[in-house]
Image (spheres, rainbow, N blue to C red):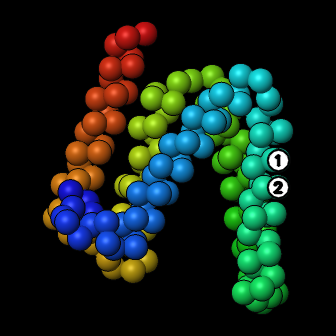
Amino acid sequence: MIAKPSGDLFSNPASLIALAAALCIALVNIALRNLGRTDEALTTVFYFILIGVLLSGPYALIYGSVPDLDILPWIFGIGIFAAIQQVAKTTAYRFAEASLLAPYTYTSIVWATAMGWLFWHDFPTLSVLMGTAVVIGCNLFIVWWEGARN
């Protein structure tokens, strides 16, 4: 509903990127759950960041540009908060099932919509709102179901 599925969906690169990203996020969440059984959160996050830098570093060296000095504190702050978030997420997956934590991830839909409206005056279409309602409703059901089982 959100991506307005049709026969052309798979010919649109943006839709394919979104589907690939969703698959990768699901795989990372499963990996975090499995790694949490044997490794400390800081170890996992260190290697996650190291591999990300090693993979993106050559691209940044070739195609990137040096940021202005006045933006460096923002970049540093984003890096610190991203690292804290990653440690918190990795720790959460150590102690809880992925199916219980996934609904909390989807709160980003609400935040992204709010930020899009606030900063860019962009409001989602009816199909996006309906699709989002389905996703949020399903995730609320999962939270309720997991709570009822325990």
- Which residue does the image show at 65% across and 28% down from the upper left? 34
Q: Mark 1: give few (<14), some (14-19) or many (20+) Cα within 10 Å.
A: some
Q: Amino acid at mark 2?
A: Leu
Q: Amino acid at mark 1?
A: Phe
Rendering coords of residue 29 (x, y %): 57, 39
Which sits in the foreground, 62 or 48? 62
Q: Quadrant of the N terminus?
A: bottom left
Rendering coords of residue 26 (x, y %): 50, 43
Which sits in the foreground, 149 or 113? 149
- Which residue does the image show at 76% across and 35% down from the upper left? 41
- Which residue does the image show at 63% across and 22% down from the upper left? 95
Drawn side of residue 95 relative to residue 113, left or right: right
Q: Are marks 2 and 1 in contact (CB under 8 Å)?
A: yes
Which of the 4 image quarters holds residue 120? bottom left
Q: Note whether 126 is above or below 74 in the view shown.
A: above
Residue position for label 1: 46
Which sits in the foreground, 70 or 42? 42
Drawn side of residue 133 relative to residue 47, left or right: left
- Which residue does the image show at 31% across and 33% down from the upper left? 140
Disc sitting over residue 50 in the figure? 2
Q: Is residue 77 visible?
A: no
Structural distance between the alpha carbons of marks 2 and 1: 6 Å
Q: Mark 2: give few (<14), some (14-19) or many (20+) Cα within 10 Å.
A: few
Rendering coords of residue 58 (x, y %): 80, 75
Q: Is residue 89 visible?
A: yes
Drawn side of residue 89 relative to residue 9, left or right: right
Numbered disc 2: secondary structure:
helix
Drawn side of residue 30 relative to residue 46, left or right: left
Q: Quadrant of the C terminus?
A: top left
Q: Note whether 66 is above or below 107 in the view shown.
A: below
